[in-house]
Image (cartoon, rainbow, N blue to C red):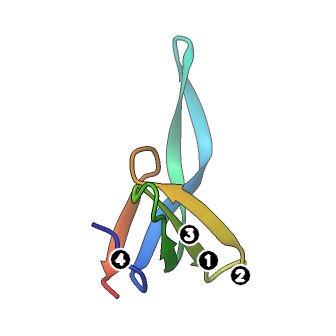
Amino acid sequence: MIKRGSLIKWVAAHESYVSNGDILVGLEPIYKQGVVLKVSDKDPSYFIVICSEDNRWHVLDTQVDDFVVLSEG
């Protein structure tokens, strides 16, 4: 379970894509990292992260986004 203050990295995009029929598959992931500011009270699968690279807030979803906890808060 993700907690406030955890340092995470997530896949923000990919350098390139390859076609697999009607589906695009991402290659060479581009990672961003940041600190979890808030976990949703209504749905804990959503949380807000402040990114250390661009100083922007990002909303991530544990069911959709690919992320790794680097350090627990």
Q: Could you say which disc has been placed on residue 48 in the image?
A: 3
The residue wearing badge 2 is 55
At label 4, counting other C-alpha atoms closer than 10 Å, the crowd grade (few under 14, some 14-19, many 20 or more) is some
Frontmost of labels 1 and 4 is 4
Nearer-the-camera pick, 13 or 46: 46
Q: Secondary structure at mark 3?
A: strand
Q: Are marks 1 and 3 in contact (CB under 8 Å)?
A: no
For marks 3 and 4 on the same chain, the one whose residue lies earlier in the sequence: 4
**Up/down of 70 relative to 32, above or below:** below
Q: Secondary structure at mark 1?
A: strand
Determine the secondary structure under disc 4. Answer: loop
Q: Quadrant of the image for the N terminus? A: bottom left
Q: Nearer the viewer, mark 1 or mark 3?
A: 3
Tag 3 and tag 2, C-beta contact below 8 Å:
no
User: Mark 2, residues whose alpha carbon is within 10 Å: few (<14), some, or many (≥20)?
Assistant: few
Cα distance in 3D space between marks 3 and 2: 12 Å
Across the whole image, how many numbered discs are drawn on residues? 4
| Disc ID at residue 8 | none
Outermost residue toward the top in this view: 21
Q: Nearer the viewer, mark 4 or mark 2?
A: 4
Marks 3/4: CA distance? 11 Å
User: Residue drawn 42% across and 53% down?
Assistant: 66
Q: Nearer the viewer, residue 61 or 33?
A: 61
| Image position, residue 51 (x, y; %) | 61, 77
Query: Residue 6's x, y, as percent?
Result: 39, 82
Q: Which residue is mark 1?
A: 51
Is residue 47 rendered to the left or right of residue 14? Answer: left
Q: Are marks 2 and 1 in contact (CB under 8 Å)?
A: yes
The quadrant in which residue 63 appears is top left
Q: Quadrant of residue 73?
A: bottom left
Residue to which mark 4 is pinned: 3
